[in-house]
Image: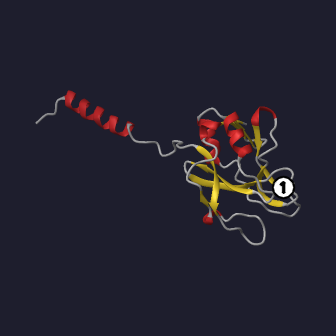
Amino acid sequence: MKVPPTLIFLVFLILISFTACEKNSDEVTGVVEIYLLEEFETVGEGAGIDAASAVTKPKPLVKYDDLRKYNAEEYFFKVTDDARETIENMPQSVFGIAFAVTADDELIYTGYFVPLYSSASVQWIVIDPLFWRLDNRMYVELGYPGLIEGSVIPDHRNDPRILDIFRRDGKLEE
């Protein structure tokens, strides 16, 4: 029996449409958010946070919609006025308040909100919750009051998952 060419063409179109509907495994999904930590353990004698022990609060402190831009060269987020107010008005501690940055609901890195007036040295990723620069810039830095020579702090501030999400939405400054 001979198969009509239109039937072959129809089957071909159906097969093409099924493969075209497959989700691209390289597609960037999700959002970047900042959470306060409910629980965590430190590593060794320093301030390093063991990511495996980190438990975030149920709701983000800073939602993705409040992160207007991310500058990958200078490591700062530009945030909305609402996000700035939320951070400024949260309880402060001279020892720092632990946070986590997530991408697509996966913990990428942890750090501490440490106010500029603190006399405690924190050798981990830090954000000053009270010192804001132009355009609501929130800088994410290594160590407070700076990185001590010889200290090693894992630096995931420019993790590709974070950058890909910001790039996807036109929020990345490189």
Q: Quadrant of residue 45?
A: bottom right
Residue for point 68% across, 54% down:
99
Q: Position of residue 79 (x, y in %)?
A: 70, 37
Q: Quadrant of residue 65?
A: top right
Residue projecting furthest to the bottom: 44
Q: Is residue 110 left or right of residue 139?
A: left
Residue for point 80% across, 39% down:
132
Q: Position of residue 83 (x, y in %)?
A: 68, 39
Q: Is residue 80 visible?
A: no
What element does badge 1 sit on?
strand
Q: Depth check: 122 or 57 in front?
A: 57
Q: Is residue 123 left or right of residue 30?
A: right
In the rendered image of this protein, does residue 52 appear above or below residue 131? below
Residue for point 82% across, 43% down:
131
Question: What amino acid is labelled 1 in the image?
Answer: Tyr
Q: Is residue 23 visible?
A: yes
Q: Is residue 132 left or right of residue 38?
A: right
In the picture, the quarter occupied by the C terminus is top right
> Colour scheme in the image?
secondary structure
- Mark 1, residue position: 144
In the picture, the quarter occupied by the N terminus is top left
Q: Position of residue 86 (x, y in %)?
A: 68, 42
In the rendered image of this protein, does residue 47 appear above or below residue 81? below
Q: Position of residue 31 (x, y in %)?
A: 57, 43
Residue projecting furthest to the left: 1
Mark 1 neighbour density, 10 Å: few (under 14) some (14–19) many (20 or more): many
Q: Depth check: 167 or 63 in front?
A: 63
Question: How many numbered marks, from 0 up?
Answer: 1
In the rendered image of this protein, does residue 20 appear above or below residue 159? above
Q: Depth check: 144 or 18 in front?
A: 144
